[in-house]
């Protein structure tokens, strides 16, 4: 198992950041600005009071290591991201369900939105497990760095989106 911890600061209150993370236009905005993301499409959204449950299909730009190209095809690296956001606690739980490799891939995590000075902190914590003999740890190392890099790119795009949404409000 590999763990990801990422802290990102934003110059807006936590409620504004949470609203941006749940905004209906965020997925398309991210797909246009995150280099390794081809598309993000909301499949399901259920709102009950302070809780928003979503399922979002994610299609990355195919970047398959050459050594794996004989076994892994581009359509095999897509996934659905299921999340449950609670506006009252500022916590979003996330589970990634891959289209392929479900028996060997597990990623779950939380995103906590908390006050930080006059702004907000987004703390992402996740655990990745790849259940494959011999190469599991190597695959985990590769994927956790890809996830980190993409989360950092998403953080930059989110900063831009928050500014855009704040101007429109």
Image (cartoon, rainbow, N blue to C red):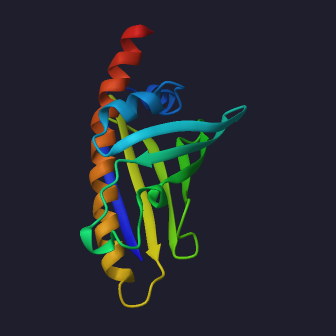
- Residue extending farthest to the right is 48
Residue 120 found in image quarter:
top left
> Outermost residue toward the top?
168
Task: Give the camera-side residue of 29 and 85.
Answer: 29
Farthest residue in the front direction?
70
Looking at this view, is 164 or 120 the one in front?
164
Q: Is residue 136 left or right of residue 96?
A: left
Q: Which of 135 and 92 is in front in this view?
A: 135
Residue drawn at (49%, 54%) of the image = 110
Quadrant occupied by the C terminus: top left
When the figure is inspected, residue 166 is found, relative to residue 31, above or below; the finding is above
Specify whether 149 is left or right of 122.
Answer: left
Picture coordinates of residue 44, whole percent (x, y): 67, 38
Name the spot of residue 91 as percent of width and height, x first: 54, 46
On the rendered image, what quadrant is the N terminus found in? bottom left
* Vertical order, 143 against 169 (above or below): below
Percent x, y for residue 154? 33, 41
In percent of the image, x 50 and y 71: which residue is there?
105
Q: Position of residue 65 (x, y in %)?
A: 27, 67
Up-down relation of residue 84 to residue 161 (above or below): below
79 horizontally vs 2: left or right: right
Q: Quadrant of residue 88?
A: top right
The number of numbered discs placed on residues in the rendered structure image is: 0
- Would you say residue 7 is visible in this rendering? no
In the rendered view, tell whether residue 157 sits above or below residue 95: above
Q: Is residue 5 visible?
A: yes
């Amino acid at each position: 198992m590999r763990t990801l911890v990422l802290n990102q600061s934003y110059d807006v209150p936590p409620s504004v950041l949470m609203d941006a993370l749940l905004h209906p236009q965020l997925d398309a905005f991210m797909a246009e600005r995150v280099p390794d993301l081809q598309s993000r499409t909301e499949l399901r959204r259920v709102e009950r009071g302070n809780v928003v449950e979503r399922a979002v299909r994610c299609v990355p730009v195919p970047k398959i290591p050459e050594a794996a190209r004989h076994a892994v095809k581009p359509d095999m690296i897509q996934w659905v991201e299921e999340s449950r956001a609670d506006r009252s606690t500022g916590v979003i739980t996330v589970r990634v369900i891959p289209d392929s490799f479900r028996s060997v891939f597990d990623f779950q995590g939380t995103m906590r939105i908390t006050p930080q000075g006059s702004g907000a902190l987004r703390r992402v914590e996740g655990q990745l497990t790849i259940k494959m003999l011999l190469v599991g740890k190597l695959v985990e190392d590769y994927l956790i760095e890809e996830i980190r890099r993409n989360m950092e790119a998403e953080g930059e795009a989110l900063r831009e989106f928050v500014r855009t949404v704040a101007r429109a409000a």
